[in-house]
């Protein structure tokens, strides 16, 4: 699991480069991605089912992104966009379409619904944290 | 304060934000603040995903945004600029000058981005149960992928085509390298390599716009993200199916 978190850190760091994030913020984007993967694995170890880990880790990334945004005075998007990508069900998307093309509709439906559940859980996780007032998050001392 | 100048400046700032991947509510908010700071009279701004109208006093302009890329550093810097304007730290001329600098600032060079995409692909392959030779395969695929995307962007190809071709190219190259003896787990390699093309910004901005109550842009962005995701998966899936069919089910 520690190995996975380190890989998520590096992958997110590189994603931030792809999105042209400023040099000084790259490492923080990496932390957001590492936290996403770490929380996801910890929660999926403790519970079964797909939506819960995705929901909790998406919420965790959003909390981190909002705190970082306040501390470093950058838009939340800078940290949230790369940070959320390790959670996006890319494999699910591909496997859904692939089974659909191979006319394996039962499989496509099963994977497809799991993928949708995961995507919806990420969305709900982000929305929940965005609904909170800004004063709850870390702030730079004046 | 000359209204025409202010109108030109706010149109340029809005375009800069929208082109580089800012959410609609941010564009609207930034423009409103800048204009209110310099002009007390009536002003109105209406922003959607693909363009916006600005109205200051009796002057109105329409800006159409066609090429959208992702440059979060520019979004962040324009955001900072607007804060400084509202706090009264800089004058209009200074702001215009600083905006010019931000606009002309180059993105990361191609070779750095190519390396980033390559490393990103190979690490996502490792995360998705690939082994070292799988990740080496994805590394090469990622490097070629970025050059292909860069080339198509330069030719102003539509986003849908870029993603679809990207997905298809990932599948073709992965299988070619697999046939040459690099990598074992085709599924892990492909799902790892498509990760840099996944619409993360689309999803995030769609949600932010929907939360801000901007359903028109939020809905459009959500649809955009779904189309991109479908194009990506369809590109890779269609090629893999054809290869599987031609090889008589031996691959996969």
Image (cartoon, coloured by chain):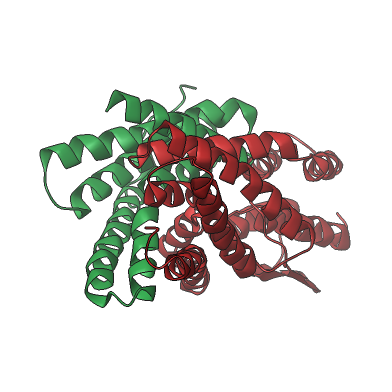
In front of the other: B82 or A8: A8
Position of residue A3 relative to residue B79, above or below, is above
In front of the other: B192 or A115: B192
What residue sits 50% from the left and 70% below the top?
B227
The quadrant of the image that shows the C terminus of chain B is bottom left
- Image quarter of residue B19: bottom right
Residue B116 visible? The answer is: yes
- Image quarter of residue A24: top right
Residue A71 visible? The answer is: no
What residue sits 19% from the left and 50% below the top?
A52
What residue sits 70% from the left and 48% below the top?
B147
**Residue B77 horizontal side relative to residue B240, left or right:** right
In front of the other: B215 or B195: B195
In front of the other: A85 or B64: A85
What residue sits 66% from the left and 39% below the top?
B114
Whole-percent x, y for residue B243 in the image: 48, 65
- The residue sitting at the left extreme is A47
Whole-percent x, y for residue B241 in the image: 43, 68
Chain that appears green = A
The quadrant of the image that shows the N terminus of chain B is bottom right
The tint of chain B in the picture is red
- The residue sitting at the top extreme is A141
Whole-percent x, y for residue A93 in the image: 38, 62
Position of residue B221 relative to residue B70, above or below, is below
- Image quarter of residue B78: top right
**Residue A58 horizontal side relative to residue B60, left or right:** left
């Amino acid at each position: 699991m520690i190995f996975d978190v380190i890989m998520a850190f590096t992958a997110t760091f590189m994603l931030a480069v792809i999105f042209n994030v400023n040099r000084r913020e790259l490492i923080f984007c990496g932390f957001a991605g590492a936290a996403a993967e770490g929380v996801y694995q910890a929660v999926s170890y403790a519970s079964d089912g797909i939506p819960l880990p995705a929901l909790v880790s998406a919420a965790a990334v959003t909390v981190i992104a909002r705190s970082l945004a306040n501390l470093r005075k950058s838009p939340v998007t800078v940290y949230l966009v790369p940070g959320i990508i390790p959670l996006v069900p890319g494999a699910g998307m591909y496997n859904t379409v692939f089974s659909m093309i191979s006319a394996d509709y039962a499989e496509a439906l099963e994977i497809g619904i799991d993928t949708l559940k995961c995507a919806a859980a990420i969305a709900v996780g982000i929305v929940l944290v965005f609904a909170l007032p800004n004063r709850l998050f870390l702030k730079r001392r004046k | 304060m000359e209204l025409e100048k202010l109108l030109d400046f706010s149109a340029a700032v809005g375009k800069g934000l929208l082109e580089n991947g800012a959410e609609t509510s941010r564009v609207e908010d930034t423009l409103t603040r800048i204009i209110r700071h310099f002009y007390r009279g009536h002003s109105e701004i209406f922003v959607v995903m693909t363009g916006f109208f600005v109205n200051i006093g009796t002057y109105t302009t329409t800006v159409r945004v066609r090429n959208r890329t992702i440059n979060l550093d520019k979004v962040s810097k324009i955001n900072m600029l607007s804060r400084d304007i509202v706090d009264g730290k800089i004058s209009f001329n200074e702001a215009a000058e600083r905006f010019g600098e931000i606009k002309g600032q180059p993105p990361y060079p191609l070779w750095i981005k190519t390396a980033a995409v390559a490393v990103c692909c190979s690490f996502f392959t490792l995360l998705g149960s690939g082994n070292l030779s799988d990740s080496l395969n994805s590394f090469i695929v990622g490097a070629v992928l970025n050059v292909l995307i860069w080339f198509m962007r330069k030719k102003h190809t539509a986003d849908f085509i870029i993603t679809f071709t990207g997905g298809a190219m990932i599948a073709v190259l992965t299988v070619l390298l697999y046939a040459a003896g690099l990598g074992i787990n085709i599924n892990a390699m492909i799902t790892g390599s498509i990760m840099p093309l996944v619409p993360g910004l689309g999803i995030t901005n769609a949600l932010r716009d929907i939360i801000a109550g901007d359903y028109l842009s939020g809905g459009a962005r959500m649809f955009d993200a779904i189309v991109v995701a479908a194009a990506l998966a369809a590109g890779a899936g269609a090629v893999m199916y054809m290869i599987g069919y031609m090889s008589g089910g031996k691959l996969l």
